[in-house]
Image (cartoon, rainbow, N blue to C red):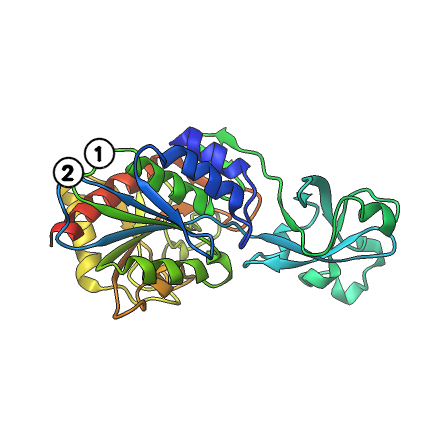
Amino acid sequence: MLEMIKELCTLSGISGRENAVRDYIIEKIKDYAEYSVDPLGNLIVFKKGKNPAKNKVMLDAHMDEVGMIITAITAEGYLKFAKVGGIDSRVMLGRAVRVGDKAVNGVIGIKPVHLVDKGAEADIPKSEDLYIDIGAKDKAEAEEYVRPGDAAWFAGDFVEFGNGFVKSKALDDRAGCAILIELIRSELQYDAWFSFSTQEEIGTRGAQASAFTIAPDYAIVVETTTAADISGVKDEKRVCICGKGGTVSFMDRSTIYNKELFDKAFEVAEREGIACQPKTMVAGGNDAGAIHKSRGGVKVLTVSVPCRYLHSPSCVIKYSDVDESLKLIKAMAEEFAKW
């Protein structure tokens, strides 16, 4: 899976522009399962297992990453933009980006510090004060390469470092996509449905549509979630810890998870010798928020890979957590299929 994660993270695919990611996934799974693409761009996959499932189980991961969309070009040739998804402006300053269909190189700039009013030096910059510099001499030259409505994304390199760590852009949620691809390409005990969803970062819109289409009894959302296991953060605020396995949520800002499913995940993990941990803060949200309200209601579990520096060009995960998450997700899918 590590090579797949690397290849997936290299692709560009902000919300609503997931085409390259979807095309890659189709190439990987087309010989292993049936698939279709819906009007929102969701890739919906059915994988035949050894046995028919008593309950219909849906496994979901989103294809989109956070990024930017170009809104205007100034007379000097600089690009103004809006954020696509939740990005902290502090992680954007001076970052390399690529823009548009031609993947033009650029860098996010801001007014030089010596021109900033003294009272505003410590303020977090507003996104409207930022711009992308692509090296154009004026608006006319910039328009040869970029136009309003074009996507821009972080140019974060994929790097392996330390004791099994990986750094890249878009690990949220290309790590989850790689897990689902691995499951589809493997032998499953029971029939299963998969959704590679669009537009999660701007409101879980794709999963809302794919869950309506699939109409599952149970769903497992495969995600990444914030790991704050860094210096200066107290234990109860660390959310989850890299290296301790997949993270199982009991509540976030869009979902209160079924207690029976939450408890079952830890029961199965203990029985199978799988490393997992609870998410210890009520924060964030994911496709579960849309899926659990679909049709007449769906019982949902979220298993996330712990990720430091989420929604930045330098997301960090530990690969062993991907492996442990895969084991837990596969085991839980089998439990739900036969309940």
| Residue toward you, 45 or 185 | 45
Q: In which quarter of the image is residue 208?
A: bottom left
**Residue type highlighted by circle 1:** Glu
Q: Which residue is drawn at 25% across and 70% down?
A: 296
Q: Distance between the residues labelled 1 and 2?
A: 8 Å
Residue that mark 2 sits on: 50
For the C terminus, the quadrant is: bottom left
Q: Is residue 73 above or below residue 107?
A: below
Q: Which residue is drawn at 77% across and 67% down?
A: 119
Tag 1 near tag 2, CB within 8 Å: yes
Report helix, strand or loop for mark 2. loop
Q: Which residue is drawn at 16% across and 50% down?
A: 337
**Residue type highlighted by circle 2:** Lys
| Residue toward you, 45 or 256 | 45
Q: Can residue 327 be seen by looking at this rendering?
A: yes
Where does the image place residue 153, in percent across and percent down from the top left?
A: 62, 46
Label of residue 187 in the image: 1
Where does the image place residue 216, in percent across and percent down from the top left?
A: 25, 58
